[in-house]
Image: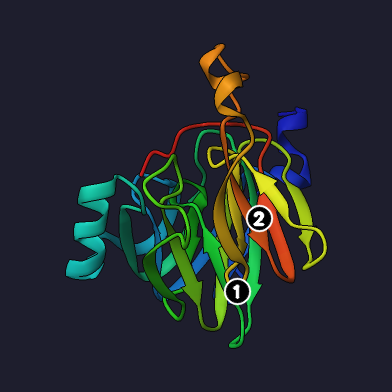
C-alpha cells in the first residue's frame, strides 16, 4: 500500500526512554514507566499495560476549581506503555523546568506533565475579581510539562523598563516571578460610548517572558 500517510514523520516509533516527547506539532507522546499526569480526556491512543484514573488535586485545589471554574481536571496514567495526548488539534510544546524554575500557566493550555513537578492553583496577584485568568496553575520543580496553544504562540520578553499588557483570554502563561496587575486601557467616557471591547488587560512587570496565543478562547477549566 502506498500513501503520504505512511511518511516517517507520521509513524509511531519504538520507545527509547521513559518520558515526554513531541510526536509532531499537534500531539505529545509519553512513554510511561510508573506514572504521568494529563488533562482528563486528552488521551487519543495508547499501547501497553496502562490504567487511567481521576487524579486527586487536594481539597484546596478542588475547592478553587469548584468556585472559580479555573484550573485543570487531571487524570493519572499508571503502568508501563506509551500514550499519545492531543486536544482540539492545538499546537503542542514541551517545556523543561529546572529546580529553580517556576511557570504560571492557564489551565486550558496544560496537556500533560511529569509527576515530579509540583502543581498548585494560585490567585493571580493584582487581578482582583476581573476577567479570565483570575486563578492560574503554578508549576515548579524539575521535570517536563506539555503545553498546547490555539495557533502559533507569541513569546514576548518582559523587562522592568518595558511592561507588557496582554488580554486575559489570550494569555497562555508567564514567568511566575513577574509582577501582575490589572490595567484599564479605556477611559470612562469611552466606555460610556460603547467602548472598543478592550477594557482590561493583565499588566506584567519585571524580568522574564509572557506567552500569548492568537486566540481569545474562554478558559474551559
Q: In the structure shown, which secondary structural element does the residue marked by tag 2 occupy?
A: strand
Q: Which mark is residue 177?
A: 1
In what quadrant of the picture does the C terminus appear? top left
Residue reaching furthest right? 161
Q: Give the color scheme: rainbow, by chain, secondary structure or one colour.
A: rainbow
Residue 183 rendering spot, x and y as whole percentages: 59, 45
Within 10 Å of disc 2 (Cα), the crowding (few <14, some 14-19, many 20+) is many
> In the drawing, does residue 214 fall left or right of residue 73?
right
**Local secondary structure at mark 1:** loop
Residue that sits furthest to the front in the current view? 189
Q: At 50% across and 40% down in the image, what residue appears?
A: 87
Q: Quadrant of residue 195?
A: top right
Picture coordinates of residue 133 (x, y %)?
46, 48
Name above or below for residue 8 compared with residue 74: above
Residue 28 visible = no
Look at the numbered discs 2 and 1 and tell me whether their residues touch, using CB distance below 8 Å: no
- Label for residue 18? none
Label at residue 93: 2
Mark sitting earlier along the chain (2/1) = 2
In the depicted structure, whether residue 198 falls above or below residue 48:
above
- Residue at 56 percent across and 11 percent down: it is 193
- Residue 165 at x, y = what percent? 68, 47
Write down the quadrant of residue 103 in the picture.
Answer: bottom right
Point out the image quarter for the N terminus: top right
Determine crowd level at label 1: few under 14, some 14-19, many 20+ residues with C-alpha closer than 10 A: some
Q: Residue at x 31, y 58 (%)?
A: 75
Residue at the spot 78% in from the left edge and 54% down from the top edge: 156
The residue lying toward the viewer, choosing from 193 and 126, is: 193
**Residue 23 position (above or below residue 220):** below
Residue found farthest to the bottom: 99
In the image: residue 111, left or right of residue 135? right
Amino acid at each position: 500500500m502506498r500513501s503520504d500517510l505512511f511518511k516517517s514523520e507520521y509513524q509511531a516509533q519504538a520507545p527509547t526512554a521513559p518520558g515526554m516527547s513531541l510526536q509532531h506539532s499537534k500531539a505529545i507522546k509519553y512513554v510511561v514507566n510508573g506514572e504521568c499526569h494529563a488533562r482528563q480526556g486528552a488521551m487519543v491512543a495508547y499501547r501497553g499495560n496502562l490504567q487511567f484514573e481521576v487524579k486527586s488535586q487536594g481539597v484546596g485545589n478542588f475547592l478553587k476549581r469548584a468556585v472559580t471554574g479555573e484550573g485543570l481536571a487531571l487524570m493519572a496514567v499508571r503502568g508501563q506503555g506509551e500514550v499519545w495526548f492531543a486536544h482540539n488539534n492545538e499546537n503542542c510544546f514541551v517545556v523543561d523546568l529546572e529546580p529553580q524554575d517556576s511557570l504560571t500557566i492557564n489551565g486550558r493550555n496544560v496537556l500533560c506533565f511529569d509527576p515530579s513537578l509540583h502543581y498548585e492553583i494560585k490567585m493571580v496577584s493584582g487581578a482582583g475579581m476581573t476577567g479570565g485568568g483570575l486563578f492560574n496553575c503554578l508549576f515548579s520543580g524539575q521535570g517536563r510539562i506539555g503545553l498546547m496553544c490555539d495557533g502559533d504562540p507569541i513569546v514576548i520578553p518582559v523587562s522592568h523598563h518595558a511592561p507588557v499588557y496582554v488580554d486575559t483570554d489570550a494569555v497562555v502563561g508567564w514567568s511566575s516571578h513577574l509582577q501582575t496587575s490589572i490595567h484599564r486601557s479605556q477611559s470612562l467616557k469611552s466606555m460610556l460610548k460603547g467602548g472598543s471591547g478592550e477594557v482590561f488587560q493583565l499588566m506584567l512587570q519585571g524580568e522574564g517572558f509572557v506567552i500569548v496565543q492568537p486566540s481569545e478562547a474562554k478558559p474551559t477549566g
